[in-house]
C-alpha cells in the first residue's frame, strides 16, 4: 500500500488558497475569542463604586438623550482625572473612558 505523502507542488492553486484562507479564518477566530474573553467596555466592567454615585446615571441620561456634548464633558473629565484616580483608588480611568467612548460611538457622536 502506498503511503500518502504530498509535496506542496502537488496541491492545486485552489487548494493552496483554501488552506491559506482557512488559516486566516482560524487566526481571526482565535483573536475574536480572546477579545471576547477580555470583554468589551460594558457598564459592568467599570468599577462604579469608585466614582461619584450619579456618574453612571448621568452617562446613561446623556446616551438616552443623544447628548454628545454631555458625553464629551464626561470623557474629558475622566481623562483629566486619570492620574489622580490611579493614586486614590489604585486604578486608572481606562475602563470608564472605554465605556464612554463606546457609548458615544453607539449614538454616532
Image (cartoon, helix red, strand yellow):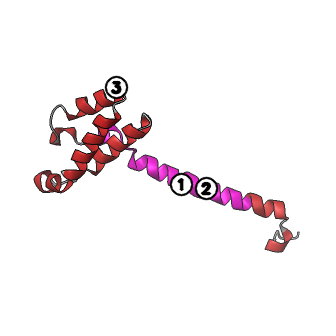
Given residues 12 and 7, the one toward you in this image is 12
Residue 97 picture location, percent across and down: 30, 47
- Residue placed at 58% from the left, 58% from the top? 27
Relative side of 40 to 75, left or right: right
Q: Quadrant of the N terminus?
A: bottom right
Secondary element under disc 3, as helix, strand or loop, is loop
Q: Main secondary structure of the magenta part?
A: helix
Q: Neighbour class for label 3 at 10 Å: few (<14), some, many (≥20)?
A: few
Secondary element under disc 1, as helix, strand or loop, is helix
Range shown magenta? 19-45
Residue 30 numbered tag: 1
- Residue placed at 46% from the left, 53% from the top? 34
Q: Mark 3 — residue?
A: 65
Residue 26 numbered tag: 2
Hey, which residue is sitting farthest front in the picture?
A: 69
Q: Which label's residue is closer to the chain start, 2 or 3?
A: 2
- Give the total number of marks visible in the rendering: 3
> Are the residues flagged by discs 1 and 2 in contact, CB closer than 8 Å?
yes
Residue 7 seen in this snapshot: no
Residue 13 picture location, percent across and down: 83, 64
State the CA–CA distance, disc 1 to disc 2.
Answer: 6 Å
Amino acid at each position: 500500500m502506498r503511503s500518502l505523502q504530498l509535496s506542496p507542488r502537488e496541491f492545486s492553486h485552489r487548494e493552496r488558497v483554501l488552506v491559506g484562507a482557512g488559516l486566516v479564518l482560524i487566526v481571526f477566530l482565535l483573536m475574536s475569542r480572546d477579545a471576547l474573553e477580555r470583554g468589551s467596555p460594558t457598564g459592568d466592567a467599570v468599577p462604579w463604586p469608585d466614582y461619584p454615585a450619579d456618574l453612571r446615571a448621568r452617562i446613561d441620561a446623556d446616551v438616552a438623550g443623544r447628548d454628545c456634548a454631555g458625553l464629551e464633558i464626561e470623557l474629558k473629565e475622566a481623562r483629566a482625572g486619570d492620574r489622580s484616580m490611579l493614586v486614590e483608588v489604585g486604578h486608572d480611568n481606562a475602563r470608564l473612558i472605554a465605556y464612554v467612548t463606546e457609548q458615544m460611538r453607539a449614538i454616532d457622536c
